[in-house]
Image (spheres, grey):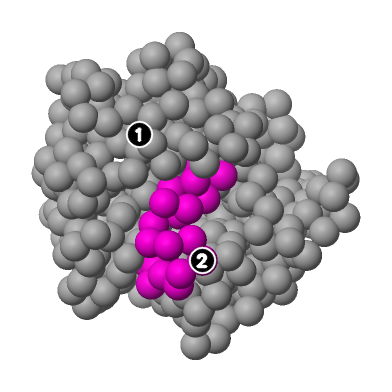
Amino acid sequence: MPPVAAGLVVFFASAAVLVLEILAGRLLAPYVGVTLQTYTGIIGTVLAGISLGSWYGGRLADRVDARRLLGPILVTGGILSLLTGPLVALFGAGLVGGGPAAVVLLALVGFFAPAAVLSAVTPTVAKLQLDSLGETGSVVGRLSALGAAGAIVGTFVTGFLLVAAAPTRPLIAGLGLALLVVGAVVWRRLRRQGDRARGGVALLALLAAGLSAAVGSPCDDETVYYCARVVPDRRNPSGRVLWLDTLRHSYVDLRDPERLAFSYAQVFGDVLSTLRPPGAPLDALHIGGGGFTLPRYLARTRPGSDSVVLELDPGIVEIARRDLGLRTGPHLRVRVGDARVGVRRQPDDAYDLVVGDAFGGLAVPWHLTTVEFLSQVRRTLRPDGVYVLNLIDYPPLGFARAEAATLRRVFDHVAIVAPAARLRGRLGGNFVLVASDAPIDTAGVERAGAARGGDERILSGAALDRFAGGAPVLTDDYAPVDQLLTVPY
């Protein structure tokens, strides 16, 4: 096999493994969400496949003529790549919302085999290239470098270009078909197998391609970051629910922006009712757009308010415009990008209100929870400005307690609002934290909640300190949010 052709095959096979690894997170997200645990399970599983494939591929190449192996390895890798979507869909339906075990199982089912098979390409090609023991080091080193280069290119091209350009399943199908084509060419050039063997493999490839095409996506829209669906509310013709991966993220009433259906959003409304005179306009910064429920609520209940929304995903903004009644303009502006960067760009003393409602799965992204980030939020607030944050946690409430302790480190006054059973650590769900350098009108928040029939309680001062207990303060150097958050699997 010519050295240039050998290098290109190794480069392509290694790139294919990393393309699959990155796309695995998007393929698994509708079933198990996107968390640190998701990526940990995927990376560990693919690395295990690479290890097994490299070891066994080399061992097999020593026992069987490598010219007979390379083409079938590439074709098999293509077939297995085409089957990732159908296999994940088949097993994922029974593992929705599962924990680490579900993540690892889905990663094993979908991606271990193709990673292992494609990783056998490098030792097989090395066997073909070795003419003498005197050149072992240079051949193995060159192929290893080309394999690493392919992995780097596959990573960058997928993460920076392909994910934004096309849905996941067509990308994986295209990769599988490319592997089939390259494998068929290599197979034919290195060894002319009988028509029966090639015919049988071609039939398997067609079946795999057919299955891949037949299995649809669980997403109505696949954005850069999420599997998104907008579901009508059967009880309210104008109601819409936005689902992102496995999380029911936002509720929007197209006809009535004042309707806040989720309990945490109602608590946000209670807090808003205590700011300035009722109905007075506010300058607000929203961290996370989602369904844009709060900006629309603020525009309706406090005419003249100005809202700036920091939303990571441009696809979510388009869905909100298309399906959720979002209308941007001078008083409602959207800035697409990471909120950590976006907050840093905001001017000092610019806002009466900052709303934190950004999620990756069930967790607030860790870099939006730390002392350093909250200090930037505080910088953007006016002296009497308020920061309200929504988070989710379950007993023993490790994350909720830690975030309360972190807010106490940054702001002079902090309160937490939730039903009594949650505050006592008996139940889990949403918690709303309120922080300001000015005294918080806790009595006003309680009155507003009682007036709408809410069952929330509010803790502040010494009671909040007891709630936080000895919880760690989160910093950029130490913010294990995914480990502190308890999830009821």
Q: Which residues are magenta?
A: 266-287
Does the magenta run of residues contain 4? no
Taking the spot 59% from the left edge, 48% from the top edge, the residue there is 249
Residue identified by numbered label 1: 416
Residue most toward the front? 277
Left or right: 411 in relation to 251? left
Left or right: 227 in relation to 348? right
Residues at marks 2 and 1, CA–CA distance in whole angstroms = 24 Å
- Residue 421 screen position, x and y as percent: 48, 16
Where 408 sits versus 476, above or below? above
Residue placed most toward the observer, 264 or 345: 264
Labels 2 and 1: the sequence-earlier one: 2
- Residue 15 screen position, x and y as percent: 42, 61
Q: How many marks?
A: 2
Residue identified by numbered label 2: 279
Question: For residue 1, what is the image quadrant?
Answer: bottom left
Q: Crowding at label 1, few (<14), some or many (≥20) Cα neighbours within 10 Å?
A: many
Where 165 sits versus 266, above or below? below
- Residue 246 screen position, x and y as percent: 61, 40
Amino acid identity at mark 1:
Ile
Q: In this orientation, does residue 157 appear?
A: no
Secondary element at tag 1:
strand
- Residue 345 screen position, x and y as percent: 24, 76
